[in-house]
Image (tube, rainbow, N blue to C red):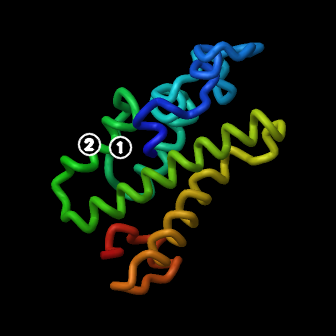
Amino acid sequence: MWLVSLDRLPTRNNLAYKGMDMPSIRCPLCDNFVETCDHVFDSCEFASYVRAGVSNWLQIVLLALHGPAELLHLVDTMQISMEKKRVVEAIVFCGCWSIWKFRNDKVFNKGKQRKEYIIDNIIVYSYLWLSNRTKKKYMSLVEWLSIPLSFV
């Protein structure tokens, strides 16, 4: 997320700006717009699909904004406890990581992953990350699936 906030990920636009010969600077996920960090993680139709799935799972609204930095600012301004904000933030981080991983799989492995599994991956990765970093409370994966914001 640090690289995303600095716009330092090797997106096609950034690589072309640095002088690399790119066959196309279009987003490999939607093939409609220039691939920038803001596009990949916010305005791309694939990012919208992920955001809708995560919003549905969490039962909160994660709006389409102008990039990941504004999404994290939205999380910071939510009217929920600081612990719940940290859980949502971790889920957002896992979502961004999963989108980038999916994008790289499509570019370098000819897209062997299936789009339908990305929400499941975000749920499992965020559960594993939080359950291994938090000593306060144990929560089963079944509880995490049904009530993730009670993980505080």
Closer to the camera in the image, 124 or 55: 124
**C-alpha span from label 1 to label 2:** 8 Å
> Residue extending furthest left?
79
Near mark 1 (Cα within 10 A), the count class, few <14, some 14-19 or many ≥20, is some
**Amino acid type at image mark 1:** Leu
> Residue extending furthest front?
18
Mark 2 and mark 1 in contact (Cβ < 8 Å)? yes
Closer to the eye: label 1 or 2: 2
116 to 38, vertically: above or below? below
Q: Residue at image x 80%, y 37%? A: 108
Q: Residue at image x 51%, y 78%? A: 142
147 to 88, vertically: above or below? below
Q: Residue at image x 32%, y 74%? A: 150
**Amino acid type at image mark 2:** Leu
Closer to the camera in the image, 61 or 40: 40
Give how far across and how far down residue 137 sits, in percent: 36, 85
Give how far across and how far down residue 14 sits, in percent: 57, 21
Q: Which residue is mark 1?
A: 62
Tell me the SS state at disc 1: loop
Is 9 on the left-hand or right-hand side of 105?
Answer: left
Closer to the camera in the image, 27 or 14: 14
Q: Quadrant of residue 80?
A: bottom left
Tell me the SS state at disc 2: helix
Q: Which mark is residue 74?
A: 2
Task: Work out which quarter of the rendered image holds the C terminus and state it.
Answer: bottom left
Is 74 on the left-hand or right-hand side of 116?
Answer: left
Answer with mark 1 or mark 2, whichever residue precedes in sequence. 1
Is 14 on the left-hand or right-hand side of 144?
Answer: right
